[in-house]
Amino acid sequence: MNYAYYPGCSAKGSSADYEKSTQAVCAVLGMNLVEIPGWNCCGSTPAHAVDTELSAALCSRNLDIAAQQGVEKLLTPCPSCLSNLRHTAKRMENPQFRARVDELLDNPAAPDFPGVTSVMQGMAAHCDANGIASFIRKDLGQLTLAPYYGCLMSRPADIMDFGDPENPTLMECLLAACGAKVLDFPLKTACCGASYGIPERTMTARLSARILRLATDMKADAIVAACPLCQMNLDLRQPQAAKEADAIFAMPVLYFTQIMGLAFGLSPDTLGLEKLRVSASALLDKLEPAPSISKTPVEGGQSCE
Amino acid sequence: MRIGVFVCHCGSNIAGTVDCAKVAEIAKNFPDVVYADDPMYTCAEPGQAAIEAAIHEHKLDGVVVASCSPRMHEATFRRTVERAGLNRYMFEMANIREHVSWIGKEQQANTNKSAELVEIAVAKLRNNRPLAAKTFDVTKKTLIVGGGVAGIQAALDCAEGGIPVILVERESTIGGKMAKLDKTFPTVDCSACILGPKMVDVAQHPGITLYACAEIEEVSGYVGNFSVKIRKRATYIDWEKCTGCGACSEKCPSKKTPDVFNEFTGTTTAINIPFPQAIPKKAVINAQYCRQFTKGKCGVCAKVCPAGAIDYAMQDSFVTEEVGCIIAATGYELMDWTIYQEYGGGRYPDVITSLQYERLLSASGPTGGHIVRPSDGREPQTIVFIQCVGSRDNSIGRPYCSGFCCMYTAKQAILTKDHLPQSRSYVFYMDIRTPGKMYDEFSRRAVEEYGVEYIRGRVSAVYPDGLGRYVVMGADTLLGEPVEIRADMVVLAVGIEAAKNAPALAEKLRISYDKYGFFMESHVKLKPVETNTAGVFLAGVCQGAKDIPASVAQGSAAAAKALALFARDKLENDPQTAQVDARRCVGCGKCIRCCPFGAITETEIRNEKKAQVIETVCQGCGLCTSTCPQGAVQLSHATDNQILAEVNALCR
């Protein structure tokens, strides 16, 4: 089944491994991700922090492309892109705002934009927990995982529509379907420090350290992320966090798609695991061949939605 | 007809934006108006005297007062005209304060509108007829719904005043929330010790009939003559035989039953007596957990009961009581705090409610009065109290203050220090609200003598640190910086809400409730005990947040209202009732079916079916008048002709 897809710019750079594993896992699930042609950056943090209309113009151009293609639902892996696209769609409901944004565009934007949703929600809508279980080739039963959504995926609640803003549970459902032990991770929606890693490095280090400290104390084998920036702060900047907290961390931080890929028996190479700064090799050692593989979904499979 | 018009200035309330003298001047041109004046304060003693004098001097036979809402002073002015010899229904009121001066600033427009409202009132008055009230007998008996401290106080005061009382309690024992408390502020005396004797008095008073495990099923009738159907829920124990010995719960094998009385801090048996001082001290079976019901076999309690009181086949039964007035004292419940996912949403065992903490403090509680963590039974060293969890929070639609949390949090912090001298307590607060007698002194003691650390600010998150303790993250808004506390236990001062089925009861009692489910008093300031339904009074938190002293005071106040009502042997009805014109009535019966009060019956006049209104039952709602296809039913004092006269005056 084809899905219109907006990768966002991190997918082409800093989170190439997220992109690679997303593509691989979606292929297994029978989701063919089709990039919309000629997309541009959503503006990320700088655009909307400086100029809401500029940010909306950047996003509207992408939404307009999708609309011209007749897309009904657009998937994106990045919570920041999702947030910008959804905020834009909401703001463009205001005619005065739309008029000002249209002035910035070559042509006025399409009157109706397609809905935008996260790849994670797209997967849950595509197949239920049993459907996911049917693809399992490796036993993740020895893995204890700390699901971490970041602050943006579920907030603001009315825009993001991602369950309870303080306690979303979709990732838990997917990871459990893959056979892993999933922690009730209290800081799952806490902020990692986000883009303050550049202007206020110690603040980001402090916030990330809090998350890494809790995952370590809860004896997680890995933190499972859903956001390129969170993953970068927790993984790449882990030494900075350790220094700030005067601690030693060795906490692998994987994307949820990488964990799913491992459960589906995909090779570390296919999932871009070599891109991780904190090695996931300890995790890989804990994987075992799945004892019995059920090819057909069990009746009455539970939906993760 | 000779009509006098009085256009009140109400100080500057009306005169500020209405030219009252001009309105009076205009009124002189309305038909039948022979006198008009614009007094400063019409409701004051000189104002009323002026009306009486004008009635005599100008031989008036009808009076219009243009002033405030009839809900404020209609009764006042009716008495005024009556003193001067007029029938009280030969009076009309035009509301030019709430409907005009308070809502518009333009004097010209306000003056015009006031004159029009006066014209309407005059037109109505010209069609008024004198009406006379009928008297009826009163059943001198009070029904009280809810056996918390407010209901108990009302019951004892009524009974002491010689009025028999029916006390209906939903739970198996009276005592309400107060019975669950350990100590009470500001004197830190034992709750059970001061409430217990009152509960015993209820049980022993010959004038009080107690129905526990019972609820109100139906209410019919009117002030002086209510008929109340009460559902007595099946307890599966014959309470006539039960001696409260407790042998049954000792032997009951179903020991994992949730303990409602202890706020789910422990478990109990499927058959049990909630606490040692329970009134009535009778056992009840929780059928959801009783093996006789869930598995179909057990019967242990039936075997061990020395009185042979167990009856597994018991069904709900009904009893109907005739009473003259009803006091609602249904109390409150804690709101469902688990919507606060940032505090764990109920997933963390050592994050508990203040009421659960009361049970831990109580010597008759699940821990025998020792403060220990529910998760591992260890004594906590650091305890964080969070105030306003579900109070004053617009984000969840609860803007109101729960009133007593500041005080009980101070009390709990003080008691914590008494129980665990080495412990440290922190209180996160928004404001300290302690306006009662000796209240602020008490909360200061928590800070100054007991070293409780008060932090002004909200808590953003509570989460387990993975090592057995909890991280409490918050803001200190006085220092303007974030704070983080490692706690062993967190106690939430959970806000209150109206009892779950309060709106359903309100509808049965035909009283109003606000959008939070609290019952509406007749007047916020001047009638805090009465409702808009005659003969139904309020006591305790069912009317709004209040603490024990205020609940007790309102319980006594409600009893005083009941005793005042019963001081008279006969009551007068309101003659603004429906009247059937038998010549026009075709006996279709539509009015009988639409009447919500059962006030219309069928009768026979010369072998023809006719509708007949029982005047003492009719509440004057007017449903029947608009239902009647023949226009045969007219509401006295709001007849079709009177309403049409008003409309014509306005549309002329």
Image (tube, helix red, strand yellow):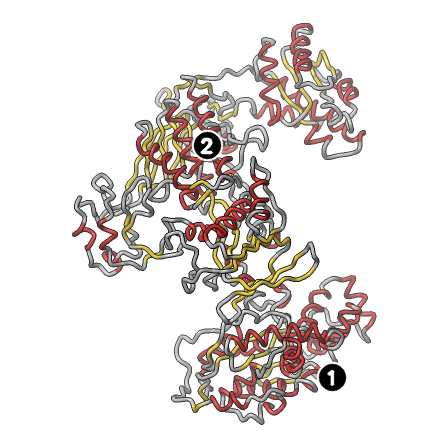
* Residue B102 percent across, percent down from the top left: 72, 32
Disc number placed over residue A209 in the picture, else none? none
* Residue A166 relative to residue B606: left or right: right
* Residue A190 percent across, percent down from the top left: 61, 69
Which chain is disc 2 placed on? B
Camera-side mark, 2 or 1: 2
Element type at marker 1? loop
Amino acid bearing label 1: Gly
* Residue B64 relative to residue B141: left or right: right
Q: Are marks 2 and 1 on the same chain?
A: no
Q: Nearer the viewer, residue A56 or B33?
A: A56
Which chain is disc 1 placed on? A
The quadrant of the picture occupied by the C terminus of chain B is top right
Q: Mark 2 highlights which residue?
A: B555
The answer to whether one can see residue B357 in this image is yes
* Residue A18 relative to residue B150: left or right: right
* Residue B95 percent across, percent down from the top left: 67, 27
Q: Quadrant of residue B96?
A: top right
Q: Is label 2 in contact with label 1 (beta carbons under 8 Å)? A: no
Q: Is residue A100 above or below residue B176?
A: below
Q: Is residue B577 above or below residue B230?
A: above
* Residue A275 percent across, percent down from the top left: 63, 90
Element type at marker 2? helix
Q: Nearer the viewer, residue A168 or B559?
A: B559
Q: Nearer the viewer, residue B381 or B181?
A: B381
Q: Quadrant of residue B9?
A: top right
Amino acid bearing label 2: Gly
Disc number placed over residue A38 in the picture, else none? 1
Q: Nearer the viewer, residue B279 or B79?
A: B279
Which class describes the residues within 10 Å of circle 2: few (<14), some (14-19), or many (20+)? Answer: many
